[in-house]
Amino acid sequence: EKKPLNEEQLEILRDCMLSRRDRAILEFFLSTGCRVGEVGNVKVSDLDFNKKTLLVIGKGNKQRRVYFTERCKRAILNYLKEREGKGIYSEYLFCSSKAPKNRGINVEPHEKLNNRGYQVIVRKMQEMANIEMKITPHTFRHTFATNALKSGMRPEIIQEILGHSDVGITLKVYAKLAQSEVEYSYRKLVS
């Protein structure tokens, strides 16, 4: 069973000495709920920093709107500023920090991160944070959805954000409540 990160684990991850790119990746995953394959295809030009939103292409080539937080926006802007200062160019939001091969007088753009690249970065985050549970890019999606449900977001809205075709999928995968939450709610509302 996949488990979301708890609040303490999230703060430990944020406290790690992450590069600006890795911090932006962490905040992007946590605030958008995107799949790793969707994040890999996001271009800088896709982001609307004023509205803190973007369109992503999900499963089945379906387009949907996702949103990001102010914390995520700041992390991305810091990363892009640093990237520009280092002469790193790519149309993609997240790219490799390895220098591209130069072909003649044309300088190739840096390659976009692929799924494996995100997995390596997330594993490095887990090791730096010394968190025992296995963390993958999908753990962040699961954490996003679980926290949204706990905060009172309607399942239909979470379904839309995550790009699920059926709200039943959202409920089946993310609405498993811990027994302590059930007891707390019961005691608060019934007792």
Image: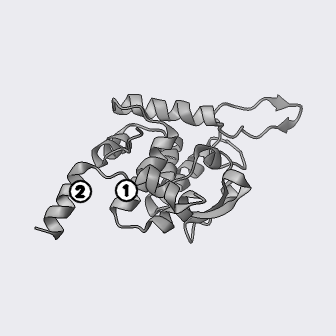
Instruction: Name the residue carrying label 2.
Output: 182
* Horizontal relation, residue 104 to residue 75: left or right: right
Q: Residue 14: percent from the left, percent from the top?
A: 37, 44
Residue at x 51%, y 40% (from the top left corner) = 137
Q: Quadrant of residue 155?
A: bottom left
Q: Which residue is nearer to you in this view: 131 or 172?
A: 172
Quadrant of the drawing holding the N terminus = top left
Which disc is residue 16 wearing?
none
Q: Can residue 67 be seen?
A: no
* Horizontal relation, residue 148 to residue 162: left or right: left
Q: Residue 186: percent from the left, percent from the top?
A: 18, 63
Distance from label 1 to label 2 (Cα)? 15 Å
- The mark nearer the N terminus, 1 or 2, is 1
Q: State which mark lies toward you, 1 or 2.
A: 2
Quadrant of the drawing holding the C terminus = bottom left
Display coloring: one colour
156 shown above or below 2: below
| Label 1 CA crowd tier, 10 Å (few <14, some 14–19, many 20+) | some
Instruction: Give, as a three-letter code, the residue at label 1.
Output: Asn
Instruction: Name the residue carrying label 1.
Output: 147
Q: Can residue 60 be seen?
A: yes
* Horizontal relation, residue 100 to residue 76: left or right: right
Instruction: Give, as a three-letter code, the residue at label 2.
Output: Val
Residue at x 34%, y 32% (from the top left corner) = 131
Q: Quadrant of residue 9?
A: top left
Q: Residue 83: percent from the left, percent from the top?
A: 61, 45
